[in-house]
Image: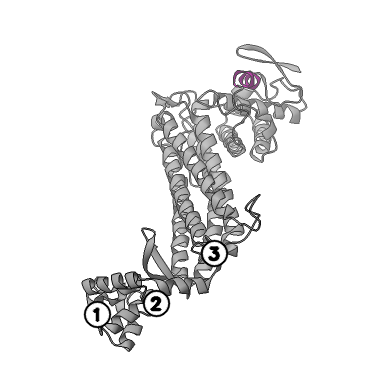
Amino acid sequence: MRTEKDSMGVMSVPDDALYGASTRRAVLNFPISGRPMPEGFIRGLGLVKIACACANEELGKLPAEKSRLIRQAAREVADGKLTAHFPVDVFQTGSGTSTNMNANEVIANRASQLAGEPLGSKKPVHPNDDVNLGQSSNDIIPTALHVSVALALSHVLRPALVHLHAVLDAKADAFARIVKIGRTHLMDATPLTLGQEFSGYAAQIAKAIERTDKAVAALRELAVGGTAVGTGINCHPEFPAKVVRFLNEETGLDFIEAENHFEAQAARDDAVEVAGHLATIAASLVKIANDLRLLGSGPRSGLGELRLPATQPGSSIMPGKVNPVMSEMLVQVCTYAQGLGQMVVLCGRDGHFELNVTIPLIAYALHEAVNVLANGARQFADACVAGIEADEVRCQELVDRSLMLVTALNPYLGYDTAAAVTKEAFSTGKTLREIVLAKGLMDAAALDAALEPLSMTKPGEGPLAGGGG
């Protein structure tokens, strides 16, 4: 152990730790969950510290050599090389001050190493006076929240959704000519193609991608420059704009300085909005996962229109049983993500006066939701959707047995007569065709044309075009 000092006194710190007294104090104060702040958040905080050093150097507030050392050390944080030195629990001071000081100490101590000075010497870089220059936890932690979550949405979740969309879209093309029975209210409806059904799933994910972009846009405003309560005390007036410029150059995103710094620190409505987008994406994924496992149910007693890939044995007692485990995985992932989103909603209420004091938990929840949704969507695409096969014989069998083909007879028979035909077919076990012909309601050629299932799947064509019913 070595000895370091903060404003409250002396603390013993592990010899090999790059953090200092404030961090060690926080570790001892918050032995709650064993979960440190998300790595993505810490890496985003490293980027923010780089941008702050660049801005301070450009403003003449920080000597070039100090700036170089801070930027080199902060780059190691941003690259994930120093993550092990960020041990502070998620459940800590609500402003994230402990994590901000953790970053300041790690960067300062790493700068000491790079300069050949001992750890804890605060030479040549001081954690507060230099690394934290022009900053406060109250504006820097919300800034790191926005930057890190926006990067996770852009670089983790979005590519996974793009991949899932491509796989679903390919299946929509492959299944374009396979006619199957539609279902509404879980009951038989008129036919559609399996390709049309999958095109709906692909469209859901296309909208999920758009929602991911909207979530990034919701995080566009950065709180940097507000310092303690939003007034910008001890911060150069040009500092926030320069920080934002450096962050945009670094990330390729389009951040701007917050229009109102008091809102940017007191409220986390932006994070609540992101949680809403993630909850909607999760809802889309659950819809798809549930549909696919139901369509693949069986193999003898279910719908059986799809054959899902067999990924593992499904039972410890029933030999040969295979279950839709990828759908089950994704449903659980999405339930978890929506629960995390609700946590963010609740946290968003706790902005008391000039500061929201639940930011570490918001950061955890959003990063966790993004990561599990991305991993779940990608695995579902690769281990389930990509290997799905259609059982064309089963699809045709169910179409042939369906009574809802009668809908195509509405223009010829009228609703009431068509309904009577359906009820008689159901009660007698006869086909629609048999009953219509027996009653002399239509001739065979016209009836066969009207009941041709593929024509019912094409809007504007066939018997349903302009059909009125």
x, y percentage for residue 302? 50, 61
Q: In the picture, residue 203 is in which quadrant?
A: bottom left
Q: Which residue was labeled with disc 3?
A: 300
x, y percentage for residue 354? 41, 24
Mark 3 or mark 2, earlier in chain: 3
Q: Which residue was labeled with disc 2?
A: 453
Q: Amino acid at mark 1?
A: Tyr
Please provide the residue range marked out in magenta: 22-30
Q: Residue at x 39, y 63 (%)?
A: 183
Circle nearer the viewer, 3 or 2: 3
436 vs 326, left or right, is: left
Q: Residue at x 44, y 70 (%)?
A: 398
Distance from disc 1 to disc 3, alpha carbons, whole Å, reads 37 Å
Q: Amino acid at mark 3?
A: Arg
Residues 356 and 349: in front is 349
Residues 189 and 244: in front is 189
Name the image quarter holding the C terminus.
Answer: bottom left
Distance from disc 3 to disc 2, alpha carbons, whole Å, reads 24 Å
